[in-house]
Each structure stands twice: as C-alpha cells, then as structure tokens.
Amino acid sequence: MGLPRQVYAEELDALEESALGGLDLVSGSLTRTLEAIEHQDIELAQIVIADDDRIDGRYLEVHQALITLLATQSPVATDLRLISAMLHVLKNIERMGDQCVNICKVIPMTGHEPPADEALLRDILAMGVNAKALISQAKRAFRERNIEMARDLVDRDDVIDELNRECFRLALEIGDDADQREWAMTMLLAARAIERIGDNAVDIGEQVAFVVTGLFREFEDASHPGGATPARET
Amino acid sequence: MNTRPTDASGHAETDTEDAQGARAGSPVTPSFEVSEPRPRAKGSDATRAVELRDLSAYYGSQQAVKGISLSFVPGEVTAIIGPSGCGKSTMVRCINRMHEEIPGAHAEGQVLLDGTDLYGSGVDVVAVRRAVGMVFQKPNPFPSMSIYDNVAAGLRFTGAPRDTIQETVEDALKGAGLWEEAKDRLKSPGTGLSGGQQQRLCIARALAVNPDVLLMDEPCSALDPVATLKIEDLITELRERVTIVIVTHNMQQAARVADTTVFMLDGELVEVSGTKKLFTNPEDERTERYVTGKFG
C-alpha cells in the first residue's frame, strides 16, 4: 500500500481519467443517435436510451468518489479547482447523455419511413458530426489543460449554432405536407438537443480555464451575446 | 530549533517581571500606554496594527527568520503556516519580544505597534508583553492557582483594586467563552479543567490585561476536535477586540479562521494572500506544493 498522499494523487488522476472517459461514452451515444436519425432506426434509438444508464452510472460513481476525496483529503489549490471542475464536467456529461436520449425519444414519433427532407437531414447530421468533434476537443483541452484549445470550442460551436439556424429556416420552408412538417418539427427538437450538446462542450472548456487560472469566466454569456462575462474568482 | 521548553513558563516570567517592575516603580516608561483610548479599526473594536520591518531572528549565529517585512491588519486574524522549522513560531515570538529570552537568541529589524518600535530603546518589555498577549501550544495555567487567580494574576501585579479585578476576571472568562463552565468553580485549581478549558483559561488570562494583539502559537494542537472548534469560534469572536496572529500546522484551521494567510519557508515569506485565495489559487508554486501536501 502506497503513502496516503501518493494514493490520493493517483486516485485523483484516475478519477479524472474516469470522468473524461464519460465523454467517450457520450461520443459513442451521439454516434448511434446520429445513425438512428439518418436511418430512422427506432431499435437503435431504444438502445441509446437504455444505454444512457452507463453514462448516469459513470456520473454517480465518479461524483461519489470526488465527494469522498473532498471529505477525506481536504483538497486545496489546484486539486480543489480540479475537483470542482470535474463535478461540473460530470454534470455536463450527464446532460449531453440526456440530450441524446431526448433525440432518441422523438425518433419513433415520425414512424418507420418518414418523408425526410434531404437538406434538413444533412444539416442535422453535420451538426452531430461537429458536436462529436467538440466533445473530443473538450476532452483533449481538459486533459492537456490547454486554454487556447478550450477557447477555440466557442468558434467551433458557432458552426453548430449556424447550422441550427439553417435547420430552422429549412423547416419553415418545408412545404404544406402535414407528415413532412411533423417530421421537420421533430428534427428541430433533435437539432436543438445537438445544439445544447455543443454548449455543454463549451462549458467544459470554461472549466479548463478555471482549473488553469483559478478564474471563472463564461466564454460566451447567453444573456450578453457577443461578449464574455468578466472573470470572477470563485 | 524554536521549541524551547521555556515557552511554557513564558507567561509566568512575564507576570513576575510585571510585578517586579510595578513594585520597583520601573524607571522605564513605555512609549505607549496600554490603557490609553485607542483608535478603532473600521467596523470593529480592534486597535493596533503590527508591522514587521526587515525582521530577522537568530539562535546564536543561525538565522531562523530572514528579513521579513509584513503587516498584520487590526481586527483581522492572520494565520502563519509553513513546515516545521520554517521560522513561523520564532517570528511570532519576536512580536512580543519573547524570542530574546532564549539564551543566545536575538532579533534584528523593527516590530512596530502602531508605529512604535517595540525594539526601540526605552521600551518596557513588560509593557510590550501586556499589550501583546500570547497563548501557547500546550495550555499552561499557573499550576498552584485557582481558575480565578489564574485570570487575576496579571491584574494583581498592576495593583488594580479588588472589585475591578473581580469584574475583569468575569469579563475575561466570558470573553474566553469559559464563564458558564467555570463560574461555579472559580476557586478550583485551573489545572483541574479539561485541556480545552485550560486553553480557554489561558486565553482569558491573556485577555484580562486587555491586550491589543493576541499571538497564538498552535493553540489547538493539543486539543480534541470539539475543543478545537470552540477555540476557533472564540478566535472569530475575539477578532473584534484584538488583532490575532495564529501559528498553525492545521491548514484547515487557517482556512476556517484566518482573513489573511502567510506561508513561510526557510525563514522567508513566500506568500501573503487572502485566505480564500491562498487555499484555492495560490500565487507561488511553493505555496501550491505545500498546501496540496506535495512537500513539507
């Protein structure tokens, strides 16, 4: 058995690995979600819903271990900031998993062979691919404590936001067919969920900056578009 | 190097000197009056600011404190942390001139109490120690004295009238949070109290002479968690009355009670920060490594 402080350091490393591993789970879930959208695969959608328990389980497991570390090791300074950030990131991961579930819940609503619009479908899938890239980048930025990479998430998220607006325009113009309109409305819900996944990835980037600098700053403030909030010590 | 057994008798020596000084009509007039009306810090009753200027302390030729300059803000609690042997206790003991009591030890530089250099010529050491009280790691009530006499000892040496003493003892015991527990056994020996009560008795003894500054050198290290929390509550209350400097090895204690935390290493100041900042986002890499337990 190692020295207590060494064990603690190793445990903290392992928990970070485990927490960030949750992003891989989300990425896998999103991949299957996109496939279910593309092929209107209701069975696959149900698998995604069932599989969300794994993401929730990871959240609970790492969250509990972090609380135990807080209680037993009284972490301070960088360790404390890291644990605080991980608690946030875990919540982001759990929410991203839930967004995949939200999408998969609406997929069956339009039946097995809905009248899909190619352009709208293409944009939603592009949103998903971008969101997956954001998840991957957020994970790397966190692991490498790379603020520049974290901040770049905002620009890449803008692409998703623009695609989301494009989806909205396409849905408005989709025509008079009731079934197709219903499908388009459903796809807007999916687009909205993917857009939120992107936002969660940006939130993880903000936690990277907090771990590194000790200052919390929203990269983009929804209530003050176009500008970041002033940095605050927490 | 700085844990001489003479610590425990420090107060006894102080009070004895006080008594002798008073009886002999000490010719040395302190350059400040302990009981004079004091300027009040904003929002509190605390009074005097302590400032160290290029303070060094030596044990023989060995330098334990290396040219430290630091201000202690009135009405605030300042915690000094650092690994064993870093000079934190030595530095604190320079503030009430106890360091020089150790054979071969001396200090250089200035310790200013509201601008008056406590090491200046003509300063009465006894008056310094009355103005700057101290509580030690191990509770050290006078063993042959009752609870009451322990608190009254310092006052008696000043020749205070009996009824004043009685009133002050009660106030001091209340101030130290010990009155309710001790009021029915004031004539019992101070050493009959529990460790935590004895430490509060020592705090009451220090408070009785109405100090401006209270130095606490690991005051809870010999106490159980409940007694520790009582002392910490007391520190929080007392900061309204006195400027408090606490040396502690317990970083969580520093985090709980201190407004400012000072990190020392090898006799030098490494970092002086607001406590919240020092424990969440320290400036210096060495502070980070120490508080996260990576050395020390």
Image (tube, rainbow, N blue to C red):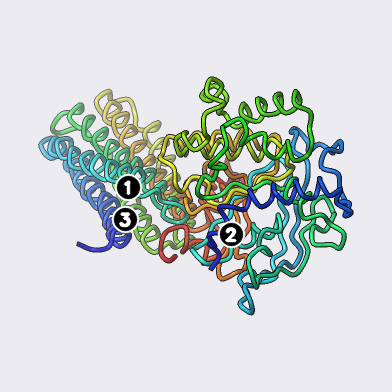
Asked if residue B291 is positioned above or below residue B165 in the image, the reply reads below
Task: State the residue in front, B194 or B12.
Answer: B12
Disc number lying in front (3 or 2):
2
Circle 1 marks a residue in which chain? A
Closer-to-camera residue (B117/B51): B117
Q: Tag 2's secondary structure?
A: helix
Describe the element under mark 3 as helix, strand or loop. helix
Residue that badge 3 annotates: A12
- Estimate the x, y position of residue A204 in percent, counting from the top left: 41, 49
Q: Whole-Å distance between the Cαs marked 2 and 1?
A: 31 Å
Q: Residue at x 64, y 61 (%)?
A: B91
Q: Residue at x 41, y 55 (%)?
A: A79
Q: Residue furthest bottom?
A: B61
What chain is tagged by disc 2?
Answer: B
Q: Position of residue B227 (x, y in %)?
A: 45, 36
Left or right relative to B216: residue B288: left
Amino acid type of the residue tagged 3 in the rendering: Leu
Q: Mark 2 highlights which residue?
A: B89
Query: Looking at the rendered structure, which numbered label has been put on residue B117?
Result: none
Residue under label 1: A69
Mark 2 is surrounded, within 10 Å at the Cα level, by few (under 14), some (14 to 19) or many (20 or more) other residues, namely: many
* Residue B11 on image: x %, y %: 63, 49
Compute the Cα span from label 3 to label 2.
34 Å
Name the quadrant containing residue B262: bottom right
Q: Relative to residue B212, is residue B118 depicted above or below? A: below
Disc 1 vs disc 3: Cβ atoms closer than 8 Å? Answer: yes
Q: Nearer the viewer, mark 2 or mark 1?
A: 2
Mark 1 → mark 3, Cα distance in angstroms: 8 Å
**Which element carries disc 1, helix, strand or loop?**
helix
* Both labels 2 and 1 in a single chain: no
